[in-house]
Image: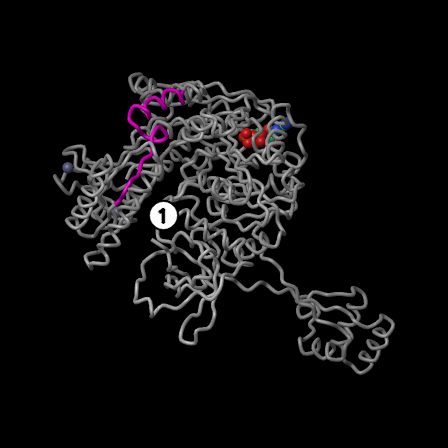
Amino acid sequence: MEERFADIIIDISHEKLDKTFQYIIPDELRDKVKTGSCVSVPFGKGNYLRKGYVTGLSSRAEYAPEKLKKIADVEEKSMDAEGGCIALAAWMKEQYGSTMITALKTVLPVRRKIKGIEKKSCKLLIPVQEAQELREGCANRKQTAKARLLAELIRMGELPMPLITGKLHVSAQTVKSLEKQGVLAVISENSYRNPVKISRETMDARMEAYGAKKELSPGQQEIISHILGDFDEGKRDTCLIHGITGSGKTEVYLSVIEGMVRRGRQAIVLIPEIALTYQTLLRFYARFGERVSVMNSTLSQGEKYDQWERAKKGEIDVMIGPRSALFTPFSKLGAIIIDEEHENTYKSESMPKYHARETAEKIASMQQAVVILGSATPSLEAYCRAKSGKYRLYELTDRQAGGKLPSVYTVDLREELKQGNRSIFSRKLHGLIQERLEKKEQSILFLNRRGYAGFVSCRACGFVMKCPHCDVSLSEHMGGRLVCHYCGYEHPAVKNCPECGSKYILGFRAGTQQIEEALHKEFPGARVLRMDADSTRTKDSYEEILNAFANGEADILLGTQMIVKGHDFPNVTLVGILAADLSLHINDYRAGERTFQLLTQAAGRAGRGKRAGEVVIQTYDPEHYSIVHAANQDYKGFYAEEMMYREMLLYPPAAHMLAILVASPKEEAGRGLAEEIGILLKKEWPVIGPAPASVGKIQDIFRFMIYVKHMDYRRLIEAKNTVETFLAEREGKGMAGKEAVQFDFDPMGAY
Ligand code: ADP
Ligand code: ZN
Ligand code: ZN
């Protein structure tokens, strides 16, 4: 059927008009109007022409066609950035499932214009001689303020306004009257809010390590010239750089970007975690200076808007940030670099649940840019594509700074217990920490947990304290307070079991706070810094802690996941992994991969400087393949074993998987809808479920899951479209309740 109608979003910067309106596509525009087109349409009572974007085409009119207005014209000139956004949003909607406006908002993370900061200054307009005479006249007439201002202007030529009204005590009135006389001019200049705050001292201190351009190794050189050479030949294959930690990947990124800048192109550098911003920024700043900026959720609205504007105007070459920095509106993008490509944070947790890797490839293909992935432990997805020839694989195998790979010791905690050691530190780890303290070297201790994290259970009857709103156990925090990590529900400390009254109701004590206390007890005088979600609540706390540690203000850095990623502390020669298998016990097909990555990355923190490093892996499960391969720093061995398991069970990347979440405040309604969807899909697709999610209830909302697996991603998109159509029809019949349905392609974790 012919598509004669267009859904249009009018002037998307107005939040109130966040819905589509249907228009007729006139015959003469039939060929030009496509999804993503920028058009002008008559809108509102006055039928004024407004700009709008076509978000979808259809063959059916939602209202009587004679009531619909016609599209006036296609705005051909406005197609570039904005047009690209619409097309990208349309792609995301199709690829991942979400409403168009949500997808649009995702690709336009900066939507509000925030007035810039005006910098005012005064400039002398008349010749100095003339000004001298005027100043003397003013002095004689006792117009002291005027005389003071003139004297300074004669001396400096130009003065900032705050200095005039502040230090010089000259009123705005006085300035105005001199301006009227034509003696001076008030100039106002728009100045950008700059989120990059690096002090001179910090820069000088770090310049030595980061600033100087390194003599590149032959391996690095080869990768760089390959990537740039391919780029010049018009080849745009995604590149995967598999290089152990410290092998010089970042140095490669820097040089590739330099090459891009020479070609008049810009680059986006994605980092997995805001905590890494400062370190990354320092290195890029040392190379590119003011032409680097950052984008992330800690920025104010005004700062964000200004960075967007600077990027649009070509005032910066490099944007560093998390996922959302992908949407930076550069005019000539050359490269998108995704560092630590395997990290979970590259997958969005809200609709549309897009993955930065595929989205980057889409953006790159739209702008003729290249995507470069880097990791010491590539995701199974990326490595699988590299092996099949879809990606170009590059390898870096040696540490550049001369450091060697650390020696790794695996300690069986069950044996420790048998030997009577009940401490969280094995004898091996204890000894090595002591040694570091004596040698004044630094250690990192890693725990894959947060807070007191342990659940509280009754040793007499087995009762577990659970959140009344979510199907999860509560975690014990400082002072015995119990907290739900899904909804934030709090419960005061418990003294007696609510079930049997026993007083032996206790928490499983193995959180970072607990370990910090143990450290103080076992190593009195050791300076400990703790970094976890609790200690990094405030805006700058990540950077403060990292800086303090880098500056040698502590002997031991203790923390959760966030300390194992990417940081480069040359004085760290010991890494202790306190309970390596904790991350194996989550109900999730990626648990083995997560564990291998965490352990390998954590181990990679040791010995990044001149001194050799040592790593202690403490575990209850020393034979598990994830732990064995991590201890041997053997990625390929791990990949082979893990891939076998994925192929056997048809998990990604061996097949694709679509998770459909049905959420409802009413259990029966949710289950009913999930069953209907299941029956609908089973006609054509192999379906798993529906079943209650492993977290069956969050904030009083019941959750049911349906999984569909298929080798062909497009078949899963069709399944999603089928469900969407079904839901729209249901809505049309007025049968929809409060149920919500979400799609997640190739999910990262369990529901
Ligand atoms: P990765 O990103 O792979 O972890 P980096 O690029 O951070 O590796 O390099 C690790 C360390 O080695 C850094 O301190 C870096 O300055 C240094 N480095 C990198 N390349 C070279 C080189 N060619 N010569 C000397 N030092 C280098
Ligand atoms: Zn009890
Ligand atoms: Zn809860």
Q: Position of residue 42 (x, y in %)?
A: 44, 70
The part of the chain drawn in magenta is 638-661
Indicate the colouring scheme.
one colour
Confirm whether residue 634 shows in the render. yes
Q: Is residue 454 left or right of residue 628?
A: left
Specify whether residue 632 is painted magenta. no
Q: Position of residue 235 (x, y in %)?
A: 57, 34
Q: Position of residue 99 (x, y in %)?
A: 35, 53
What residue sits 38% from the left and 44% below the top? 95
Q: Is residue 749 left or right of residue 364?
A: left
What residue sits 32% from the left and 24% below the top? 647
Q: Say which of 187 and 707 sits in front.
A: 707
Q: Is residue 497 left or right of residue 399?
A: left
Amino acid bearing label 1:
Ser
Confirm whether residue 602 shows in the render. no
Which image quadrant for residue 577?
top left
Which image quadrant for residue 408?
top left
Q: Is residue 65 left or right of residue 392?
A: left
- Residue picked out by circle 1: 350
Q: Position of residue 400 (x, y in %)?
A: 60, 25
Quadrant housing the C terminus: top left
Ligand 1 position by quadrant: top right
Give SS at disc 1: loop
